[in-house]
Image (cartoon, rainbow, N blue to C red):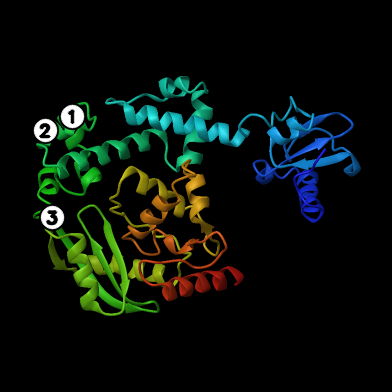
Amino acid sequence: MKQFFDEVSDESRWQAVETRDNRADEQFVFAVKTTGICCRPSCSARHPLRKNVLFFENVAAAVDAGFRPCKRCQPDKPAPEQQRIDRITEACRILEASSEPIVLAELAARVAMSPFHFHRLFKQVTGLTPHAWQKALRAKRLREQLNEGEGVTRAVFEAGYQSGSNFYQQANEVLGMTAKQYRRGGARATIQFVVGSCRLGEFLVAQSERGICAILLGNDAQSLIHELETLFPNSSLDVGDESFAERVAQVVSALEHPGQQVALPLDIQGTAFQQQVWQALRQIPAGQTASYSDIAQRIGKPQAVRAVAGACAANKLAVVIPCHRVVRNDGALSGYRWGVDRKRQLLEIEAKQREE
């Protein structure tokens, strides 16, 4: 009977078994010679003696060696956490395939869960409630239809809105402007902006009718204004008035104290996936970091690591949506839209604030 792992590694695996560490469940299984059973590291059964335990790369290897899967922890089936994520993934696919809204009870029934448990798990995995996820999905479809040149009325119904009046009540929230303005690339939408300096360097804060739509960082004012023009090519850009200056002061305070909450309306425009990622980023506590793969796991799309990185790069609200808290798996700093040095500075400020 051949063990897959070397003796040194086995000691760390035994530690995972002793602590029932569910993070190790997909990395190996352990088998008990006296019972002939193989288990997940997190199995809740009584611990065997260390001398009776062998480790294998997976269930198949243990079965080949003559062991049978535990009926309690079922190592031959997907992990419970993965099973839950798979159900939410299935629910998202059902929503994406539906041209009409689906009520909570019906959606929960289609993935064999109670509405209460499903609602809680859906928000835990995606960062959004089922209702908010469907709204973001409809908004994404609408933007795609309008970008392809589709007429407003047809685009509204193709996106899944049940009536024109239903959409027009939400138009500003969905697009930040009227559908006709969005179809023309944001024509006639007015955006106020202010440029200034803070401890992070130069900054630009911009506001649409809906709320703060851009917080940009850089080294000179002209580059920041050019970036704003690129982000909103057909909008009318105006220097902010006195009432806007009060909001800018709150943003500057958040830039210089990145753990601080910003109680301002935000104009967060993005695809359903980007909004999932940004919502997950806002749940990372100040002074802590997460990897791109961590975020992909949290939103129920573990294979979408590159797409998560893309969503971070597309963030237009520096610090308020804290993409600076995302690092590589090894903890090293990776790219940042506004420079790695600035990312390091933000993390150092947060670490110091947390110590204090």
Mark 2 near mark 1, Cβ–Cβ under 8 Å? yes
How many C-alpha atoms fall within 10 Å of the one at disc 1: few (<14), some, or many (≥20)? some
Marks 2/1: CA–CA distance: 7 Å
Question: Measuring 75% from the left and 45% from the top, which residue is drawn there?
Answer: 4
Using the image, tell me which numbered label, if any, was put on residue 71.
Answer: none
The N terminus appears in which quarter of the rendering? top right
Element type at mark 3: loop
Rendered position, 311 above or below 192: above
Q: From the top left corner, tell me how far across and down residue 65 is, in percent.
A: 78, 33
Q: Residue at x 56, y 64 (%)?
A: 331
Instruction: State the residue position of label 3.
Output: 189
Identify the residue under disc 1.
157
- Residue 102, by quadrant, is top left
Three-letter amino acid code at the position of disc 2:
Thr
Whichever of labels 1 and 3 marks the residue nearer the N terminus, that label is: 1
Image location (x, y in percent) of residue 195: 25, 74
- Estimate the x, y position of residue 8 in percent, counting from the top left: 80, 56
Is residue 278 in sight in this rendering? no
**N-terminal label among 3 and 2:** 2
Q: Residues within 10 Å of mark 3 (few under 14, many from 20)?
A: some
The label shown at residue 153 is 2
- 1 or 6: nearer the eye? 1
Secondary structure of the residue carrying tag 2 is: helix
The answer for how far apart the CA atoms under marks 1 and 3 are is: 24 Å
